[in-house]
Image (spheres, rainbow, N blue to C red):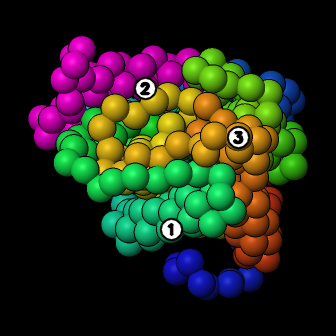
Amino acid sequence: MSLTDVSPPAGLDIGAERFLHPGPLRWLRSLGWGALLFVAFIFAYALASKVGEPAEGASGTPLSVLYVAGLSALGLALYAGVVRLAEARWPTELGLRQAAPELLTGLVVGTAMLSAVVAALLLFGLYDISGPRTSSPWTMVNVGVASGFFEELIFRAIVLRLLMRAFGIWPALGLSAALFGALHLANPNATPVAAIAIAVEAGLMLASFYLLTGRLWVSIGVHAAWNFTQGWIWGARVSGIEVKESLYLSAPRAGAPDWLSGGAFGPEASVPAMVIGTGVAVVVLYWAWKRGNFKPLPDAPKAEAV
């Protein structure tokens, strides 16, 4: 099924067997299963991030990228295995046949969106940009790969999917986006405004691509390209974290209001990011709703006793 295929409503495959079988306390079983997966994969993400983190004063390397990519692939394989055992299904959210074209689509969309944000900041006199300069991209490749694969697996395939199983689409969208934004409060230079911006422009936008396709690949590509483009290409802070090596160097212009420019948190907390990210989210969510993916696939009918 292509991104442009508007087929009759079918529903999203979010699991309906074993731990998630119909019956009493299904919502509680969904929450418990989601919490268990969330904790396990947060630890895996921390490990992948640590491996990809260069030593003090050093840059990332192609070898560190291979390590991070390998751990990301292992994380997806582990997820597929536990879902197969606990939910009696192959996770269609990891459909391999569509992986390459949808990842590429996501990379293009993420790069274009973040570049449009920086262009708007420059156009409205909110940012100064200098460069280009010589620098290594590998550290930001590590960041893009780890954040793209693990955060999408955790927040979309686990949190959003299992909240949808427990409570339905609207509570799932709101709660998963709010959690995504709230966890960014632990980042340097984070503010409540920045957390709200992340929740709305990124939490909803990245969720929309998963809901549209039923798979993670576009979301992974958008997330990875957004972070890489923001950090290495434009040299802006990534969720409050200063980037040490970049092609260009971007920073808020002196006197630019933080609420407009994003301030020390970076472009993600800016008004242009909110407008562009939220606009994309609304369009893609509408598209997903038209496709019928705001509801789960119907439960399989029970076999009648002979």
Residue at which label 1 appears: 112
Residue drawn at 62 percent across, 33 percent down: 265
Residue at which label 3 appears: 255
Amino acid type shown at disc 3:
Gly
Which is nearer the N-term, disc 3 or disc 2?
A: 2
Q: Which of pointers 3 and 2 indicates the residue nearer the eye?
A: 3
- Rounded to the nearest angstrom, the CA distance separating label 1 from label 2 is 26 Å
* The magenta stretch spans residue 271: no
Q: Where is residue 46 in the image (x, y as percent from the top left)?
A: 42, 20
Instruction: Report the number of discs.
Output: 3
- Rounded to the nearest angstrom, the CA distance separating label 1 from label 3 is 27 Å
- Rounded to the nearest angstrom, the CA distance separating label 3 from label 2 is 37 Å
Q: Is the magenta stretch mostly helix, strand or loop?
A: helix
Magenta-highlighted residues: 38-65
Q: Which of pointers 1 and 3 indicates the residue nearer the eye?
A: 3
Under circle 1, the secondary element is helix
Residue drawn at 29 percent across, 23 percent down: 53
Amino acid type shown at disc 2:
Tyr
Is any atom of residue 52 visible in this view?
A: yes
Left or right of 125? Residue 68 is left
Amino acid type shown at disc 1:
Ala
Left or right of 172? Residue 145 is left
Residue drawn at 61 percent across, 31 percent down: 264
Q: Nearer the viewer, residue 99 or 79?
A: 99
Q: Residues within 10 Å of mark 3 (few under 14, many from 20)?
A: few
Q: Where is residue 120 in the image (x, y as percent from the top left)?
A: 64, 64
